[in-house]
Image (cartoon, rainbow, N blue to C red):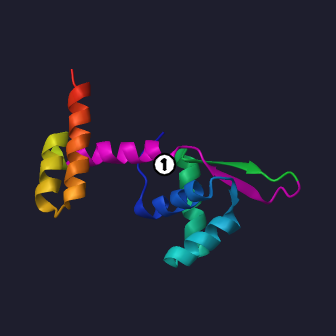
Amino acid sequence: MEYNISEAEWEVMRTLWECGEPMTSAEIVARVEDLRGRSPRTIKTLLQRLVAKGFVTFTIDAADSRVYHYSAAVSEDICVKRENHDFVSLYYKGDVAGMLARFIGDSELSRDQIEALTALLAEKKEDAP
């Protein structure tokens, strides 16, 4: 499976993940068109690309063979993990600690956010070999 999903394709995937059940192309078009103002033709092209890449599957309606029902074939969690991995590899040469240091250094964090990060790091420290 090819893991490259464009920003526009993410819009279609988010629509499918948020719905959680099979959707027709008309339903997908209506939701994405409302959110981003993309043309129906563009949205259908994005949908076909996602099918070709293996991110989306479809079934044919039993009552009307012209109607397809589309579903996400890959979970949002898997896609986000892959995107995160690619981001860290590309921009930080795989150095997660360096990336986090940069983000933390460049961000204004509340006390609660700092405490949550500290707790997360403490938990990771306990699990480290």
Question: At 64% from the left edge and 73% from the top edge, which residue is drawn?
Answer: 30
Does 73 lie within the magenta span? yes
Does 77 lie within the magenta span? yes
Toward the viewer: 21 or 92?
21
Give the image location of residue 46, x and y in percent: 54, 61
Residue 38 visible? The answer is no
Q: Quadrant of residue 12?
A: bottom right
Count the marks: how many? 1
Give the image location of residue 35, x and y in percent: 52, 75
Question: At 15% from the left edge and 54% from the top edge, which residue is drawn?
Answer: 104
| 98 lies left or right of 115 | left
Q: SS for tag 1?
A: helix
Give the image location of residue 34, x and y in percent: 57, 77
Residue 92 visible? The answer is yes
Which residue, given by chain and number where applicable, does mark 1 sit on? 76
The amino acid type found where label 1 is placed reads Glu
| 25 lies left or right of 90 | right
Toward the viewer: 111 or 15?
111
Q: Which residue is at the far top?
A: 129
| Magenta segment | 63-90
Question: At 16% from the left edge and 64% from the top edge, which residue is drawn?
Answer: 108
Q: Is residue 49 above or below residue 28?
A: above
Q: Quadrant of residue 105?
A: bottom left
Instruction: Say few, some or many: other residues with alpha carbon within 10 Å of mark 1 (under 14 / 14 to 19 / 20 or more).
Output: some
